Amino acid sequence: MDGSRLRLTGTGEGFATRLTTELAGADSPVKVLEALQTLFPDANKPELDAEPKLGSPVSATWTFDDLSLGVFLNQLHEQRILDTALDAMSARMEKNTTTFRVSRQAAMGGKVAFPIPGDEPLGGVFAITVTGPGLGDWLQAATWHSGRAQVPRNIDDEHAMGQDGDATTWV
Protein backbone atom coordinates (compact mmCIF):
# COMPACT_ATOMS: atom_id res chain seq x y z
CA MET A 1 0.00 0.00 0.00
CA ASP A 2 1.40 3.43 -0.91
CA GLY A 3 0.04 5.26 2.16
CA SER A 4 -2.81 6.89 0.26
CA ARG A 5 -6.32 6.09 1.31
CA LEU A 6 -9.76 6.27 -0.15
CA ARG A 7 -11.36 9.61 0.68
CA LEU A 8 -15.09 9.33 1.19
CA THR A 9 -17.43 12.23 0.41
CA GLY A 10 -20.93 10.83 0.88
CA THR A 11 -21.70 11.83 -2.73
CA GLY A 12 -22.66 8.94 -5.00
CA GLU A 13 -22.25 6.52 -2.08
CA GLY A 14 -25.96 5.98 -1.41
CA PHE A 15 -26.32 8.64 1.30
CA ALA A 16 -28.60 11.63 1.54
CA THR A 17 -27.29 14.66 3.38
CA ARG A 18 -29.22 17.62 4.71
CA LEU A 19 -27.75 20.67 6.39
CA THR A 20 -29.94 23.19 8.19
CA THR A 21 -29.07 26.32 10.07
CA GLU A 22 -31.14 28.91 11.86
CA LEU A 23 -30.31 32.60 11.48
CA ALA A 24 -31.66 34.80 14.22
CA GLY A 25 -31.10 38.19 15.76
CA ALA A 26 -27.73 39.66 14.81
CA ASP A 27 -26.56 36.73 12.64
CA SER A 28 -25.04 38.07 9.43
CA PRO A 29 -26.34 36.08 6.43
CA VAL A 30 -23.18 36.96 4.51
CA LYS A 31 -20.89 35.64 7.28
CA VAL A 32 -23.00 32.50 7.83
CA LEU A 33 -22.84 31.76 4.08
CA GLU A 34 -19.07 32.31 4.14
CA ALA A 35 -18.69 29.86 7.05
CA LEU A 36 -20.97 27.34 5.32
CA GLN A 37 -19.08 27.44 2.04
CA THR A 38 -15.75 27.01 3.86
CA LEU A 39 -16.71 23.44 4.81
CA PHE A 40 -19.37 22.79 2.15
CA PRO A 41 -18.29 24.69 -0.99
CA ASP A 42 -21.02 23.16 -3.16
CA ALA A 43 -23.78 24.77 -1.06
CA ASN A 44 -25.87 26.86 -3.44
CA LYS A 45 -26.07 30.48 -2.43
CA PRO A 46 -29.48 31.09 -0.86
CA GLU A 47 -31.34 34.32 -1.33
CA LEU A 48 -29.65 36.38 1.34
CA ASP A 49 -31.71 38.27 3.84
CA ALA A 50 -30.79 41.85 4.61
CA GLU A 51 -28.05 42.31 7.19
CA PRO A 52 -29.49 42.79 10.67
CA LYS A 53 -29.69 46.25 12.15
CA LEU A 54 -31.17 47.76 15.26
CA GLY A 55 -34.90 47.05 15.22
CA SER A 56 -34.59 44.62 12.26
CA PRO A 57 -33.23 41.28 13.43
CA VAL A 58 -32.65 38.39 11.04
CA SER A 59 -34.96 35.39 11.20
CA ALA A 60 -34.49 32.62 8.63
CA THR A 61 -33.93 28.89 8.26
CA TRP A 62 -31.63 27.65 5.51
CA THR A 63 -31.76 24.07 4.28
CA PHE A 64 -29.34 22.43 1.83
CA ASP A 65 -29.75 18.90 0.47
CA ASP A 66 -27.22 16.44 -0.97
CA LEU A 67 -24.10 18.39 -0.08
CA SER A 68 -20.73 16.73 -0.51
CA LEU A 69 -19.04 15.95 2.78
CA GLY A 70 -15.63 15.83 1.06
CA VAL A 71 -14.12 19.09 2.35
CA PHE A 72 -15.69 18.54 5.77
CA LEU A 73 -14.23 15.02 6.06
CA ASN A 74 -10.86 16.18 4.75
CA GLN A 75 -10.79 18.81 7.49
CA LEU A 76 -11.40 16.10 10.10
CA HIS A 77 -8.30 14.31 8.80
CA GLU A 78 -6.25 17.54 8.65
CA GLN A 79 -7.20 18.45 12.23
CA ARG A 80 -6.62 14.87 13.41
CA ILE A 81 -9.94 14.71 15.24
CA LEU A 82 -11.17 11.48 13.71
CA ASP A 83 -12.03 9.63 16.94
CA THR A 84 -13.87 12.69 18.27
CA ALA A 85 -15.67 12.95 14.93
CA LEU A 86 -16.71 9.29 15.03
CA ASP A 87 -18.14 9.77 18.52
CA ALA A 88 -19.86 13.10 17.76
CA MET A 89 -21.23 12.02 14.39
CA SER A 90 -22.66 8.75 15.74
CA ALA A 91 -23.91 9.93 19.15
CA ARG A 92 -27.48 10.45 17.89
CA MET A 93 -27.50 7.69 15.28
CA GLU A 94 -30.66 5.64 14.96
CA LYS A 95 -30.60 2.79 12.45
CA ASN A 96 -29.40 4.38 9.20
CA THR A 97 -29.75 8.07 10.15
CA THR A 98 -27.56 10.35 12.20
CA THR A 99 -27.71 14.03 13.03
CA PHE A 100 -24.80 16.01 14.43
CA ARG A 101 -23.97 19.67 14.89
CA VAL A 102 -20.94 21.71 13.86
CA SER A 103 -20.00 25.15 15.16
CA ARG A 104 -20.47 27.92 12.59
CA GLN A 105 -17.85 30.05 14.34
CA ALA A 106 -15.20 27.32 13.95
CA ALA A 107 -16.25 26.86 10.32
CA MET A 108 -15.54 30.55 9.75
CA GLY A 109 -11.88 29.72 10.43
CA GLY A 110 -11.98 26.59 8.26
CA LYS A 111 -12.10 24.30 11.30
CA VAL A 112 -14.56 21.70 12.54
CA ALA A 113 -15.77 21.78 16.13
CA PHE A 114 -18.55 19.63 17.52
CA PRO A 115 -20.49 21.42 20.29
CA ILE A 116 -21.08 19.52 23.50
CA PRO A 117 -24.66 18.19 23.56
CA GLY A 118 -26.97 20.74 25.15
CA ASP A 119 -24.61 23.69 24.57
CA GLU A 120 -25.50 26.48 22.19
CA PRO A 121 -22.18 27.87 20.98
CA LEU A 122 -21.73 31.53 20.18
CA GLY A 123 -22.30 32.02 16.47
CA GLY A 124 -24.77 29.16 16.03
CA VAL A 125 -24.50 25.71 14.48
CA PHE A 126 -24.96 23.77 11.28
CA ALA A 127 -27.13 20.69 11.89
CA ILE A 128 -26.17 17.90 9.51
CA THR A 129 -28.27 14.79 8.90
CA VAL A 130 -26.89 11.84 6.95
CA THR A 131 -29.12 8.92 5.96
CA GLY A 132 -28.34 5.74 4.08
CA PRO A 133 -27.80 2.00 4.31
CA GLY A 134 -24.69 0.89 6.19
CA LEU A 135 -24.24 4.31 7.78
CA GLY A 136 -22.38 2.99 10.82
CA ASP A 137 -19.80 1.21 8.68
CA TRP A 138 -19.47 4.27 6.46
CA LEU A 139 -18.86 6.58 9.45
CA GLN A 140 -16.17 4.25 10.75
CA ALA A 141 -14.53 4.15 7.31
CA ALA A 142 -14.81 7.91 6.78
CA THR A 143 -13.07 8.59 10.11
CA TRP A 144 -10.52 5.77 9.88
CA HIS A 145 -6.87 6.45 10.71
CA SER A 146 -3.83 4.22 11.07
CA GLY A 147 -3.91 4.39 14.90
CA ARG A 148 -6.97 2.18 14.83
CA ALA A 149 -4.70 -0.70 13.81
CA GLN A 150 -3.30 -0.59 17.38
CA VAL A 151 -6.43 0.63 19.20
CA PRO A 152 -9.51 -0.43 17.24
CA ARG A 153 -12.54 1.84 17.56
CA ASN A 154 -16.20 1.21 16.87
CA ILE A 155 -19.34 3.22 17.35
CA ASP A 156 -20.42 3.19 21.03
CA ASP A 157 -17.36 1.25 22.18
CA GLU A 158 -15.73 1.58 25.61
CA HIS A 159 -13.42 4.32 24.26
CA ALA A 160 -16.26 6.63 23.18
CA MET A 161 -16.55 10.04 24.78
CA GLY A 162 -19.24 10.49 27.40
CA GLN A 163 -22.60 12.09 26.68
CA ASP A 164 -21.31 15.26 28.35
CA GLY A 165 -18.43 15.47 25.87
CA ASP A 166 -15.77 14.34 28.37
CA ALA A 167 -13.06 12.10 26.99
CA THR A 168 -12.84 8.52 28.15
CA THR A 169 -9.39 7.83 29.51
CA TRP A 170 -7.90 4.44 28.90
CA VAL A 171 -4.52 2.86 29.24
Image (cartoon, helix red, strand yellow):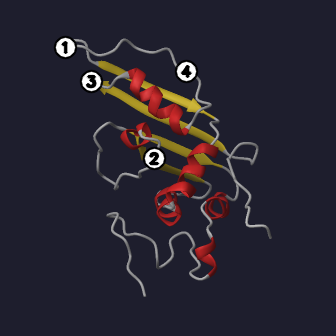
Task: Check whether the beta carbons of the residues at disc 4 and disc 1 lie within 8 A of each other.
Answer: no
Residue at the image position 47 percent from the left and 79 percent from the top: 158
Q: Residue furthest bottom?
A: 171
Q: Quadrant of residue 124?
A: top left
Task: Check whether the beta carbons of the residues at disc 2 and disc 4 lie within 8 A of each other.
Answer: no
Q: Earlier in the sequence, mark 1 or mark 2?
A: 1
- Camera-side residue of 91 and 152: 152
Which residue, given by chain and number where applicable, does mark 3 sit on? 26
- Mark pair 4, 1: CA separation: 25 Å
In the rendered image, the vertical position of residue 135 relative to residue 147, given as above or below: above
Which residue, given by chain and number where applicable, does mark 1 sit on? 54
Which residue, given by chain and number where applicable, does mark 4 sit on? 45
Which residue, given by chain and number where applicable, does mark 2 sit on? 111
- Mark pair 1, 2: CA separation: 30 Å
- Mark pair 4, 3: CA separation: 20 Å
Residue at the image position 47 percent from the left and 50 percent from the top: 100
Q: Earlier in the sequence, mark 3 or mark 1?
A: 3
Q: Residue furthest left?
A: 54
Q: Give the secondary structure at mark 3.
A: loop
- Camera-side residue of 138 and 39: 39
Kind of residue at badge 1:
Leu
Q: Earlier in the sequence, mark 4 or mark 3?
A: 3
Q: Earlier in the sequence, mark 2 or mark 3?
A: 3
Q: What is the crowding at mark 3: few (fewer than 14 residues within 10 Å), some, or many (at least 20)? A: some
